[in-house]
Image (tube, rainbow, N blue to C red):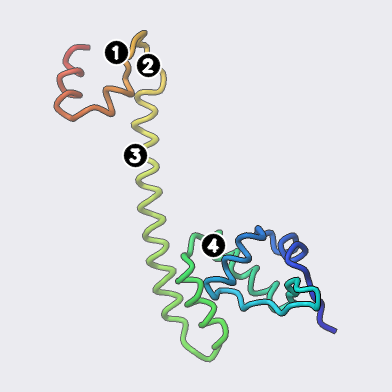
Amino acid sequence: MTSTYSIGVLSQLSAVNIETIRYYEKVDLLPAASRASNGYRQYDDASLERLSFIRRGRELGFTVDEIRELLALAHHPEQPCSNADRMTRAHLDDIEGKIRDLHRMRRVLQQVVDCCGQTAEHCELLRALGPADARSRLAGRG
């Protein structure tokens, strides 16, 4: 026997917000739910599995369109997974770039974090945010 779930129960079981579930239906990531006689949405186990797949994909940072592609691939297991590999490599490259950017930001913030200046005129963060030529002039002031 197949279980049916209200949107609230589906939300709890899948750890996906109710509004997000409605959005996924609207953009056709999640098939529209059947309706009970009272008009409430009714979801089945397949909806729960699909929603969990979508949530895990979103947690890994895949876009809605990428998840749509992955869902299509998941429903055709006989197809090669080269598109999933390509997508994963591109996504991993993007994440590596973001990690490099975060490390760079961290280094800069570590340099200005404990500013000894008493006024905004001597604030290290404000100097770091200013134009490059102003930063070099300010650096010479000490």
The residue to which callout 2 is attached is 115
Q: Residue at the right extreme?
A: 1
Callout in the foreground (1, 2): 1
Residue 122: image tag: 1
Q: Residue furthest front?
A: 38
* CB contact under 8 Å: marks 2 and 4: no
Q: Residues within 10 Å of mark 4 (few under 14, many from 20)?
A: some
The label on residue 104 is 3
Q: Nearer the viewer, residue 19 or 76?
A: 19
Residue at position x 37%, y 66% in the image: 90
Q: Nearer the viewer, mark 2 or mark 4?
A: 4
Residue 37 spot, x, y in % from top left: 80, 78
Identity of the amino acid at label 4?
Arg
Identity of the residue drawn at 62% across and 66% down: 22
Mark 2 or 3: in front is 2
- Please say if 45 is above or below 141: below
Residue at the limit of the structure toward the bottom, as seen here: 78
Residue 16 % position (x, y): 66, 60
Q: Residues within 10 Å of mark 1 (few under 14, many from 20)?
A: some
Q: What kind of residue is marked 1?
A: His
> Which amino acid is tagged 3?
Arg
Judging from the image, what secondary structure is the residue with disc 2 in?
loop
Are the two marked residues, 4 and 1, in contact with CB atoms closer than 8 angstroms?
no
The earlier-in-sequence mark between 1 and 2 is 2
Dot 4 or dot 3: first in sequence order is: 4
Q: Quadrant of residue 126?
A: top left
The reply to whether callout 1 and callout 2 are in contact (CB within 8 Å) is yes
Alpha-carbon distance for marks 3 and 1? 23 Å
**Element assignment for label 1:** helix
